[in-house]
Amino acid sequence: MSTSIRTPCTFTFVSAAKKTALTVLSAALLPALTALPAHADDKPGAKQPQPPASMSTVGGAQLGLPGTQVRLGQGAPVLPKEVSGRSWIVADAESGDVLASHNAHWRLPPASTLKMLFADTVLPRLPKSQVHKVKDSDLAGVGAGSSLVGIKEDHTYSVHDMWLGVFLRSGNDAVHVLSQMNGGWDKTARDMQAHAEELQALDTTVVSPDGYDAKGQVSSAYDLTLIARSGMQKKDFREYSSTTTADFPGEKKKGKKRESFQIQNTNRLLTGAYGVEPYKGLAGVKNGNTTHAGATFTGVAQRGDKVLLVTVMNPSANESSAVYKEAARLLDWGFEASGKVTPVGELVPPRSVDTEPGTAGAKGRGGSGKSAAGGAGAGDTAVAKDARTRVAASDGGAGGVGTALAIAGGALVVLAAGVLLVNRRWPLPALARRRRP
């Protein structure tokens, strides 16, 4: 059962009047439960944790250093002062250049931004037209206080319905059902871990596929950015990520026709809500918030022919919606600074992508020629070759998922018949090679 997708994007060619109307509607409907909870360590006078003295050097040695890393050139703007995230990164989505970072490899709880890895791993495996009748066991173990889209046992949903629930409402109930369809909760966690290792997201440890707080579950701003870059290669991932509102199947009542209800995306930079202006050109990706993780956010935005990725983890500022406002400041800086800074590192390609010796991709595997599992002894683990995954292509072209390492500057979002269509051209950069057979 498919759903209609409404009021999608904030790209520059959407008329100002239409964009304003869509934003007002989304802001009015976005529920108050998306307000950020207090963090345990945000109490006045609480001592803030410090990053490790040495961290992973995947992507470059400078990314393994604590503190802010940036190399300003002539005419480059200074970084915004009002950025309090424990960890953040700004990167060029096409070239992979990291323009600036702060504790990029600090391993921190990711909250629901981990759902990007869940989607990047599982989305290609389940046809979106497939339907599933939900059993009680499918919803067993959903954590107390979880964000939910409202899936009910003994009701039938399409895979498409459930992905809307994952991306828009960050629904842990939808993640649980899709995980069961993928072979089970534990198997899905293992699949995600293997895919993270394939992407060289080696700071990431998956315990709970939905991002719910779990002991030992961590990621980093660097890894979340790698994961988002991979996910955005998938057409369906892009469409779900950039959708603001959609219809979701409701509860069927005896003797009555099953009705739907509207769900809204909790990404405030996409929709505009609670004092946050929608960011012009934003196309996703995912926000998160838990008690231990604080607020986390990864976004991708386009301005002209430039596409940037930004991740912010756990800001300490007292301003409301700080994670979104800080991400917007970093995006503004990145668009202005592009071409005026020397990169401090790079987003490395997946392990299974062929790269020629001496290319940026080959060097990027461990940062300046080091092995990805080497680095600064910050707990990087060597990954057995047979653990590397091969994710099936979801777009049916350009060599499949992971072969295109960049979001093309010509990526477009358009409205047609009420359905969001994400079109793109893929001029692959030199470091992108076809997967090995």
Image (cartoon, helix red, strand yellow):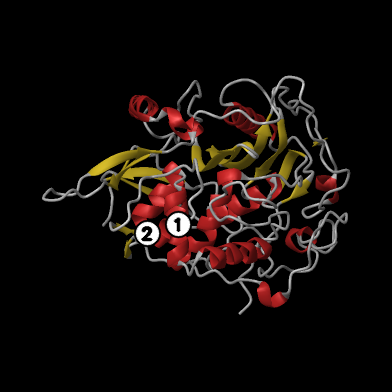
Left or right of residue 354: residue 234: left
Q: Which mark is residue 136?
A: 2
Q: Percent position (x, y) of residue 51?
A: 81, 40
Q: Residue at x 52, y 66 (%)?
A: 398
Image quarter (top left, top right, bottom left or bottom right) of the N terminus: bottom left
Residue placed most toward the observer, 209 or 396: 209
Residue 235 in view here: no
CB under 8 Å between discs 2 and 1? yes
Check disc 2: other Cα within 10 Å, few if <14, some if 14-19, many if 20+: few
Q: Which mark is residue 211?
A: none
Residue placed most toward the observer, 90 or 340: 90
Check disc 1: other Cα within 10 Å, few if <14, some if 14-19, many if 20+: few
Residue placed most toward the observer, 345 or 127: 127
Left or right of residue 329: residue 247: left
Instruction: Label 1, secondary structure: give it.
Output: loop
Residue 385 in view here: yes
Q: Percent position (x, y) of residue 405?
A: 61, 58
Instruction: Label 2, secondary structure: give it.
Output: helix
Residue placed most toward the observer, 258 or 2: 258
Farthest bottom residue in view: 437
Q: Percent position (x, y) of residue 320?
A: 57, 22
Image quadrant of residue 242? top left
Q: Which residue matches tag 1?
A: 140
Kindly identify the amino acid type of the residue bearing the numbered disc 2.
Asp
Image quarter (top left, top right, bottom left or bottom right) of the C terminus: bottom right
Kindly identify the amino acid type of the residue bearing the numbered disc 1.
Ala
Give the CA distance from mark 2 to mark 1.
7 Å
